[in-house]
Amino acid sequence: MNQADSAIMAALLVEDGYVPAESEGEAGIILLNTCAVRENAVERIEHYLQHLLGMKRKQKDLILGVAGCIPQYQREEMFSMSPAIDFLAGPDTYRSLPLLISQARSGKRAASLEFNPAETYAGIDPRRQGLITAFVPVMRGCNNMCAYCVVPFTRGRERSHTMSSVLDEVRKVAASGYREITLLGQNVNSYSAPDRDMDFAGLLEAVSRQAPELRIRFTTSHPKDISESLVRTIARRPNICNHIHLPVQSGSSRVLGLMNRGHTIEQYREKIALIRSVIPDVSLSTDLIAGFCGEDEADHQLTLKLLSDIRFDAAYMFFYSTRPGTLAARTLEDDVPEAVKKRRLQEIIDLQNDISGQLLQQSIGSVVEVLAESESRRSAAQLMGRTDTNRAVVFDRKGYQPGDLVSVLITSATSATMTGTPTDSPRC
Ligand code: SAH
Ligand code: SF4
């Protein structure tokens, strides 16, 4: 979501006559887009601001802005984080960036942090960075109130983009040569078109028909809202990737209740069973939080048991950090000691890595279709890409280019990546 927002900010600044700099050292304005979802994201920004303060001491006319979720909840107090900050913008106020910059140039510290529940940045042509995969936001904000989560306080109320604006964007992205689209929202299943009687399953179907040559992905789905019609749409449409990211957070219904997630673990398992019965070769990934308030050893064992039972392809795993203003920060005690949170997280990571590795090992000897995204980090003689099930594959280049769809024979695998070789040479 932040990458998509950065592309909107870049577009707004270019429209106002600014030119993207090749490197940080050449920039006259530096704009940091920030994430507040976990404490370590905030710590990283604090460190980076120290580095930028050093730059600013040498380059007096450098303008520094901080945008996104951290200034939205810290508000003007954020100025005290560093004397280097000239202006602040929240997720709903990017349209005021040119004004904020001109105020900063006149020597005033400026902030624009209002919520605007109608803002979807319609009409702006994002300046995306890559050329293969395009993020297309379909909604902003979140109306859920998961107890640990700061998003409703930083991104405000949920609002959906019109269906016609999403389809227009998809048309443009396809015409620009992108090969894959990821539809984005904090909870895409809550999508409700303001201009038509259409839910997310209907939108996904329409997008997949609008761009039949492109792979279509989406994230994130909330377990309580994922519908049978969505699952059937994924199964029916060949260009919608067979991958669902379905954050579970904990394997214990008691902890899910404390988290205010709105579903039990039995209901989650039922959704997984439905998904697997309709899309047998689906790949599933999840998010997990270790050491939430009130989590005991038995709850933790239930999370490990869930991982062993479901065998997710992949997981994003975090230990709990209190976020100011959230329901948990106001009403629950952060009572799991840090060492215990970290130990539980490590056990979760070890088990999940083991499972991911076993699943990838099973694919050795099979042929998978890979969308090549870039040269591999290690060598230009290899490309890196993803299967439709979102598994990373590194393979011998053999004349292929990023953007090509390549049939790859898998020859080896670790817990995160498969390695292989194309079964054909590129067609000329
Ligand atoms: N809207 C999405 C993503 C929310 S943030 C969803 O509902 O899934 C991404 C992930 O960060 C969450 O799924 C959760 O696992 C993690 N997260 C959010 N707040 C956190 C906190 N306070 N501490 C640790 N992890 C957190
Ligand atoms: Fe946060 Fe829950 Fe909304 Fe996701 S669904 S953004 S975790 S409040």
Image (cartoon, helix red, strand yellow):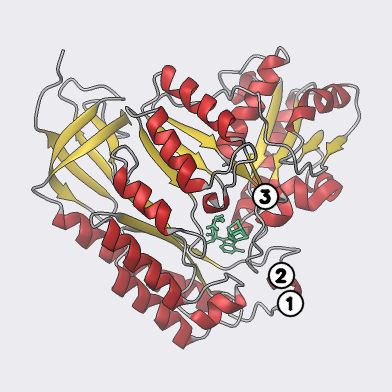
* Image x and y of residue 238, in percent: 28, 39
Residue at 47% of width from left, 23% of height from top?
171
Asked whether mark 3 lies closer than 8 Å to ligand 2, one says no
Q: Are marks 2 and 1 in contact (CB under 8 Å)?
A: yes
| Residue 85 visible, this angle | no
User: Left or right of 400: which side holds 94?
Assistant: right
Q: Which residue is mark 1?
A: 331
Q: Which residue is mark 2?
A: 327
Relative to 350, residue 222 above or below: above
Q: For residue 22, what is the image quadrant? A: top right
Circle 1 sits in a helix, a strand or a loop, which is it? helix
Q: The residue under label 2 is which amino acid type?
A: Leu
N-term-proximal mark, 3 vs 2: 3
Q: Are marks 3 and 1 in contact (CB under 8 Å)?
A: no
| Residue 120 visible, this angle | yes
* Image x and y of residue 128, in percent: 52, 26
Circle 2 sits in a helix, a strand or a loop, which is it? helix
User: Left or right of 95: which side holds 419?
Assistant: left
Q: The residue under label 3 is which amino acid type?
A: Glu
Disc 2 packing (10 Å; few <14; some 14–19; many ≥20): some
Q: The residue under label 1 is which amino acid type?
A: Thr
* Image x and y of residue 118, in percent: 74, 39
